[in-house]
Amino acid sequence: MDKYSTKEWQQLCHLVKQLVPQELGQESWYLIIAATLVTSPDPELLASFYAHVTTHNPDFASEEAKRRLSERFRDVLLKLTTLVGAPRVLCAVMPLAKAEGDVQAKAKCAKLKDKWHTDQLNMAAIYDRGVRRMDQIYGSSLLPKVFDSYGTHKEDLKFNEFFAVYGLYLSDLEVMTSLETEAVVFTSISCLGLKSPGAWHFRGMGRLLLASRGKDEPRDITTQLGNLKDAVIGVVKFVGGEFVHTSKCEQWATVEDIENQLGGWGLDD
């Protein structure tokens, strides 16, 4: 029995669709909902969300649309493994598989993507890809400061961030776009209630939005970032009071915080 009514799910979907910046793409709304639900105290809500949209939204009625939705949810889950942890992801993926139906039959037919085969993995290329992605998100003015704050742990953590967290996962843009991926990262980290990493990725989201714009387009992204944050908070409040408390959403960074505490967007990096 779903703890939320069809009307409540519909209202949530409408709210997030209305708030998510257009630059993120027409399909980014459900990725943000998915990332928030998996990070919540009730990660199994992802299955309820899948059941709702595939039952009540005609855009997800066909088998091909369901397959694509499943693949994009899987990409969210793989990336969240590095951000919120494998146990939470597993608590989401098993109910999701059940909601998708034919669990055992689909498990027997499941195939590992070519890119994950060990003979296809190029460590140097993966590492370099991670370096480039982290530089896109942080920029040269912030990233060295973050690494230097690790003290004696710096080099081991730095390697694993470049290679594993970013190289293997967060720079893999085969399924989600660059902007969608960073929106998922910002969403999940913020929902954990982690102030500094949340602020870094609020800034990173702004950097990518600005980089996606032409020279003659507006440079003010205050509204877009504020709306994205409000969309995520809307999902947090939908889940309930415990999530509102643990996410500390009233303390999330603002555009003013980025300018005053982190020296702006670092666009000259």
Image (cartoon, rainbow, N blue to C red):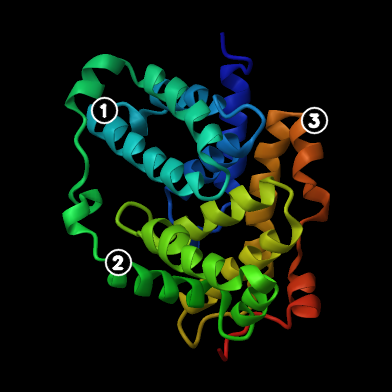
The answer for how far apart the CA atoms under marks 2 and 1 are is 38 Å
Q: Residue at x 53, y 67 (%)?
A: 156
Please tell me the numbered disc located at residue 127.
none
* Circle 3: residue type: Gly
**54, 160: nearer the viewer:** 160
Q: Residues within 10 Å of mark 3 (few under 14, many from 20)?
A: few
* Circle 1: residue type: Ser
Residue at the spot of label 2: 123
* Circle 2: residue type: Met
Q: Position of residue 138 (x, y in %)?
A: 57, 75
Residue at the spot of label 1: 62
The answer for how far apart the CA atoms under marks 3 and 2 are is 43 Å
**112, 22: nearer the viewer:** 112
View extreme (front): residue: 152
Q: Are marks 3 and 2 in contact (CB under 8 Å)?
A: no
Quarter of the picture containing the C terminus is bottom right
For marks 2 and 1 on the same chain, the one whose residue lies earlier in the sequence: 1
Please tell me the numbered disc located at residue 241.
3
Quarter of the picture containing the N terminus is top right
Q: Position of residue 130 (x, y in %)?
A: 41, 69
Q: Residue at x 50, y 50 (%)?
A: 82
Circle 3 SS class: helix
For marks 3 and 1 on the same chain, the one whose residue lies earlier in the sequence: 1
In the figure, residue 15 lies in which quadrant?
top right
**196, 263: nearer the viewer:** 196
